[in-house]
Amino acid sequence: MIDYVEKNKLLIMSTKILVSFLSMAVCFVSVSCMSSAPVEGPVDHDALYSEHPDSGYEFIVSDGTLDMFLDRSTGQFYIQDNVNDVRYYSNPPGSDNDMIANNYYKMNMKSQIEIRYLNPKLVQETINNFVGSINKGNYTVSINDSGFRFEYDFVDEGFVVPVEYYLHDNNFYAEIIIDDIIEYKDNLLLEVILLPYFAAHDGADDGYIVIPDGCGAVIDVSDRIPNAGSYSGSVYGRDSSLNIIRSTTDLPNQVTLPLFGIVDGNSGILAVIEDGDAHARIYASPIGVNTSFASAGASVTVRNSDTALLKEMTGVEKSVTVFNPAIAAGFTFKVAYAFLDEDTANYSAMAEMYSRRLFGNNEVTVDRKSLIVDLLMTVRIRKNFLIFPYEGLEVLLTSNDVREVSDRLVEIGYSDHIIKVSGWQKDSLYGKTRTAFSPAPETGRITDFARLAEDMSGRGSILVPGFDLLNIYDFAGSVRKNDAVRNVSGGFLEIFMFRSSTYLKNTEIKPVNVLNSNKFASYYSAFTGSVTGIFSMIADDTGANLLPSDNHRNTNDEYAVSRQDVMENYFGAFNSALSDNVSLMFDDPRGYALDCAHTVTNLPGSTSGYKGFSEEIPFVQMVLSGKVNYTGEPLNLAMDMQRSLLKMIEYGEIPYFQLSELTDKLHFLPTRFNENYSINLSYYLDKIEDISEFSRPYIDAVKGSRIIRHERIDDNIYLSEYSNGTIVYVNYGSDQYLADEITVLPRNYRIGGKS
Amino acid sequence: MTTSFGTLTAAVDSERLTKSADRGYNYDPYGKSVPAPNAYSLWKTVDVRDIPDGIRNPSDIYVHDDEVYILDNGGNRIVVLDHDLIYVRSIEPEHANGISDGYGLFVHSDDTIYITLYDQKSVLVIDSEGKVLKVIGPPESPLIPSGMAYRPKRMVISDDNKIYLVAEGVYYGVIQMDLNGGFQRFYASNTVEPGIKSFLSNMYRSIFTNEQQRRTSRVLPYEYSSIDIDQNSFVFTTVASDLSSSGQVKKHNPAGENILGLMNPSEVGANVIIGTGKYGDHEVNLTSAGYVTSLLNDIAVDDKGFIFVLDTSRNKIFNYDQENNLLSVFGTAGNVYSALVEPVAVDVLGDKCLVLDRKDNSLKAYAPTRYGSLLREAVSMYNSQEYEAANDMWLEISVKNNNLSIAHNGIAEAALGRGDHGTAMKHFAIARNKSGYNEAFLQSRTLLLNRVAPYLFIVGTVILIGLWLVISRSTKKVIRSISKEEILHDIRPTYAMIHPLDAFEKIKSDGKGNTIYATTTIIFIFAFRLVSLNYTSFLFNPVNPQTINFAYELLQFFLLFLVFTLCSHAVTSFIDGKAFYKETIIVCSFALAPYGLSLILSTTLSHILSLNEAVFFSLIKQIGVYWSALMILVGLMKVNRYSFKKTVLSFVLIILMILFVIFLFVLAYSLVMQFASFIEDIIKEVRYRV
């Protein structure tokens, strides 16, 4: 491998070194010129600078509410929030005296970026810019109208990483220009962590870090959870083409939205990754784990790498490091930091800020429905014709049955329901990739579905066909092997089921491949075209949650499609549907798809399970509240339906069920169908009626409004306040609770507030 | 976290990260894991934040009088929590050597505390204030082999004040002592599992010298890993090794015998393993270090008789009833907050299960979910044979978990009780419960017979007489016509079945064998075999029809036929046989006709017979097989012009040659697979490195 690297990189490296020296020389000249240029800014800030107690910092720029100061000798800076009179440091002051941090972390605390790279022996190493660049004087800084630009030159490692820091629109931005990164030695840059200690919390005041992991969670600065370690999670979940999962015990954390926040008393920051989000990770560290500070930051993965297993002649598997030859290109990594005040320094306000950023300022935009039911129409099972076995459809529901279910739901009082139908395809769920709505004849004709959709629409309900274009179960028709995504080792990405018992791959069930994003986009518009005029909404089961980079190498030996580009292709697909006036329903969506959604199901109701989380919060739900119909896990598959119902109410969700009619042939099938362990339609239709009585007051009270506040008011007691003044109290405990003069019965909820 | 129907797939399932390692599961009757709702969920975690000075390196817990005692080795103390797991007090034993090597903990009904000290090879007895009452050293008795290693692990005391102690290095059984440490006996001794390894070992050792014997490893019984006692003083034990075929979990009667009801594998059918005494995970994984299986290292039994077994290999708890039914699996490995890092001990507090984690220095309490509570209640009623009362619960449980076989057993038992045999048989079949199905079937058949009995005798007699008349005449005609036909035309398998000597003689001497008949016969027999596999009644079908692989059956059947005929021809050609290959094919295919007939007959009969009459089913199949074997023997003798003695010799040689060919096949297959794997690895390596 070393030989390979050396031989293949030699020419490129030589060129790069030459280029880098030239560029550095140019930079040096330009920086010298720029540095000596007069800094423009309000006059009173010069005075402020001269009076500033932090020696070494110079005033750089102001946008009226924020001032930026920089210490050129250390690269450290701070942002002065003049409105709230709070100062946000890039690096915690006094790191040398930190009682907890060891020398490594003390150096880290002085850095603005930290890089992870592969050395020529393909061993991962990390170094921060303080040790690798600043301390050695190998950097250039240039001041401009809105801020300054640093080029950190890691001379020993052979990287130049340019970062721009600037103020814009009352926000502070930090931006890594990926295309300008230079590699001029044999090391391979993998990841850059940006401002890991910006606005770090020293624990003096109350506060917490907000991470939208799963549904969302907070790390309280006063909480000292043993063995918690640091947190890191991939934005939008891991890239399936990398870090191949070999055991479910090693599942990485999953960040749903591209942001994090730090609340420090009555101030704090909300950091949103505005570009490069598909390549981002969020890092966080509770107080006492590495340092005396609670900190959070974001990173960007600039090169895909992984370990692949290679079997030696002895049969023993050996891991081999594999990587993409080139750095991902075509995007920057931009993080916007908004500064919080007394009113906004809480997670409810953060969620609202992000919601406005995502959906605009319209108050409520969604036509909120009261119930979502997902009906499985067929399943493919093994059958016998006399003595000859074959794979055949077991029809569980027809379009007439769906109509009956809809009628029954109207009778119960859910006239405004959504019914999603799955398994309508000719070969059920796990067959060929279908690019048109062509139902299995046994379930009904297109005209039957069309009539049903029309009738349901007439009474305020929606019929939604579910489809899955990304997963390739069968290479057939126009889907060829070359259309499948490749992982970083060059092989086709195969996604396996995992056994709950051994935590390992279930090789008895065939893995599936994933369609590349270009094909996905074209198939999407084909499918959308086939349903236009029949259905007003379609349910995309995978496009919003499976975001793998495609490492198919092109002739230049570079990425074919980076993860960021895959996301853009998905956007193109989603928008083609929206432009055809077809709304979208997503299953378990990540943040990148939310602003295209009308309805989402299976939103995470909990977190990935990081030990350091103090509390789970419905952050993602609050972002979506009032803008999108959303729901969590199906109640029929919940561990405890009563508790899940209460959680649904606490999180402002819509009741959701996944149902079908079981037949005797469906017991203990050695298929994926076993996952449906509790979907009995007739049983749960009665349950829906029971639940209706329980949840109807909540549904009526909060309809047409959004959550503006969520709070834990006591152990097992939660409060959700809505924009119409309704307050919902939820009591998970076994004792009744008196909240604001309202008695909330055990394992129950009460409506309070204005309504 | 679950998936939508559209995404109940591999693709997304592995992407779902929210506690997905913590998903509930159970096993289907064939030992395949299937998803299930969680019957227990994490209720509370007690860690260093909840206990003054925390706990360090704890090794055991014991629940006594609604209080939880934790053996805190690192703190040299015992920490006591109340039933809400709130810290109450700690007890610091006044023992000079400390209790840092403490392994097991037991609190007697008189509040005396017993601590087994692993390295100190003793049991420390203290009062509730920590004052040392006595130290019980290694047991002494002429019955104890000299040099017996003794590292006490866990112990219990019965109502009649007998100490039962399991220790490392003691493979003679559980050590039974009085309260003063006086040795009484080895209780519930495990025996050496009979097997090839033990057989060979004993054979070798018998010819070794004493010195050689001393140097070789012996096959020894498995030693116990843990022990618990229920409120009726029944002792429960675990054996860590999953190689113990007599069951890793045992409930001992006073005589030491295992009284957990184990089903004989032959009663439940091939591939069905539920209830047969297999504990822990049935699915294993292969690593470079070998197979990773469950290691059952602690056990606890609650007041209602539910058994909790701790698997320290995969960090899980398996929950069984006293009928060996696996009710639920909970706990998980990994790095999520609910994960167990290094669990060492398990106990029960009411309906909650407590698990002590040595590495995480924490105590995790799991409480039954609503589904779990319902399951506990239903199982309690089922095991006390209140089937009808439990019926509604089982119905609800089966709705909540369609994959749970014991729910179907419960529904079936209730249906059987109220005489709904159809429902009972349906659900017993789903649960693969043959004995239950048999009972329902018998009752159903008896009812039917009773209903038709008055007419059966008369109608039956008339039919039989009629049949006899028709058959006796027509049979004679048929036989005559067949005989006549065979003289004029080619021999048919029907004639060969009745007149094998004559038929095979004519095939050889008159060339009356017909390959079309032979081919048709062999195709029909294959079809009959498939019919038998697919349509034999559940009671008699050893395979799961859902898993029959048509291609495999086809290959197996015709390959075996081909190998047999080729080997037969090769061998007989070598020893002066006169048969042509065509004749061998015809003989072998005709000879299989009785076997095919027996398949059809037995398949039909399987729907009439109960297990009580299984002998008839077996008899028909065996007659078919022996008849066919005899026909092959006769056929080969005739077409090769062999004497009987030579035929037998050739038969033996044919068998040996078949075995040799199979060996060659396996060898070739293995080589081809290795070569293919080698090529695949080269391609991979080239792809990774170039």
Image (spheres, rainbow, N blue to C red):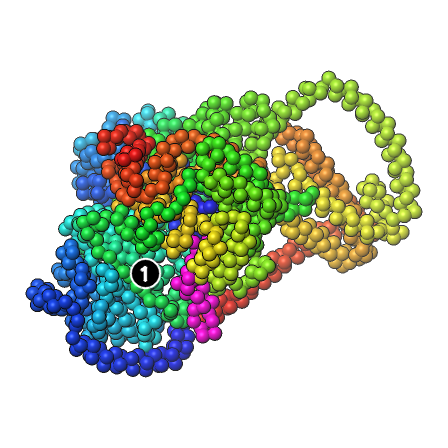
Q: Quadrant of the N terminus of chain B?
A: top left
* Residue type for callout 1: Glu
**Residue A554 in magenta stretch:** yes
Q: In this view of the protein, which residue sits in the foreground, A421 or B52?
A: A421
Q: Which chain contains the residue that carries disc 1?
A: A
- Give coordinates of residue A33: x percent, y percent: 20, 79
Q: In this view of the protein, which residue sits in the foreground, B104 or A73?
A: A73
- Give coordinates of residue B573: x percent, y percent: 78, 58
Q: Which residue is mark 1?
A: A274
Identified at 29% across, 82% down, the residue is A22
Magenta residue span: A541-568
Q: Is residue A610 above or below residue B432?
A: below
**Residue B83 in magenta stretch:** no
Identified at 58% across, 38% down, the residue is A400
Task: Classify residue B486 as left or right of residue A379.
Answer: right
Q: Is residue B25 above or below residue B164?
A: below
Identified at 41% across, 69% down, the residue is A324
| Residue A36 shows in this picture | yes
